[in-house]
Image (cartoon, rainbow, N blue to C red):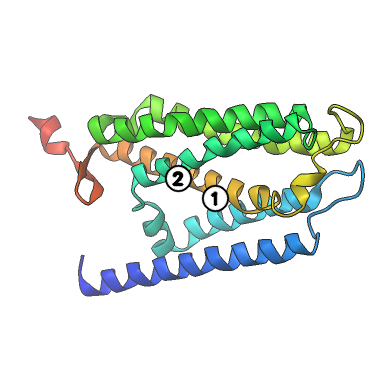
Amino acid sequence: MNDSEHGTDKRVKTIVGAVLLLWLAVALILGANHAFVGGPGALPLPILAGVLAPILVFLIGFWTVSPFRDFVMSIDLPVMAGIQAWRFAGLGFIALYAYGVLPGLFAWPAGLGDMAIGITAPMVILALRRHPAFAAGRLFWIWNLFGMLDLVVAVSLGALSAVLGIGISAEITTFPMGTMPLVLIPAFLVPVFLMLHIASLLQARRLAAAGKVCSWTEPRFRCDPVEAMHRA
């Protein structure tokens, strides 16, 4: 990497970091002002917008801004899998269900799905480091797709619970998910996790198409062409 490319890479990282901080600050301000709170029995459109808008911006940026696309395709796969390990905190949804704060229709699928991803994330990291072909393999795709499905199902069931009021009693809905601090989950964390899954799959697709093999070379995860190996 020459000085120009290094400078561009550094600027992109700075901009991405600043955007993430700004996004978090906006979510905090809107959450504190109850901007994500919907009416009783209404579809939680503000929360749905908070989930979908960042994903849309991410995809538009990826397909239209080449420096950002290069940045996304350069993020270490083990790092992205490691961040997903935080989803074991989905246990908190089940705890809130036990205390009558969240409905079971939302809490159980969302909690167990997140915990499944969080528990298996270290195994995925280990597989990426020990088995180079894993990055472009079927199991890696399945893990990421399941992680995305879990988030989509959780958001969908959360919206359904808000409308129907299904829970221990008619008064228990996903209303608390629109208030601080829980609102930061759908308004910030869920889109981040989805972006990481999407970035992982985009990298996996490129690796499979380009015929590359990945390995852990301190201090980062590297993917190199193996065309010469195939010719041999």
Callout 1, which amino acid?
Val
Q: Decide: few, some or many residues near mark 1? Use Cα within 10 Å; few <14, some 14-19, many ≥20.
A: many
Residue found 81% across the figure and 59% down from its top: 34
Residue drawn 69% across the image and 53% down it? 181
Say which residue appears at 46% left-offset and 30% top-offset. 119
Give the farthest residue toward the front. Answer: 99
- Residue 22: image quadrant is bottom right
Q: Residues within 10 Å of mark 2 (few under 14, many from 20)?
A: some
- The one of 135 and 122 positioned closer to us in this rendering: 122
Q: Mark 2 points at which residue?
A: 83
Tell me residue 39's x, y (percent).
91, 49
Looking at the rendered image, the quarter that the N terminus falls into is bottom left
Residue drawn at x 79%, y 37% is 101
Residue at the outermost left position: 232
96 and 25: which one is in front? 96
The residue that label 1 is drawn on is 192
The percent position of residue 177, horizontal first and vertical second, equals 75, 46
Q: Are marks 2 and 1 in contact (CB under 8 Å)?
A: yes
Query: Viewer-proximal residue, 32 or 149?
Result: 32
150 relative position to 137: left or right: right
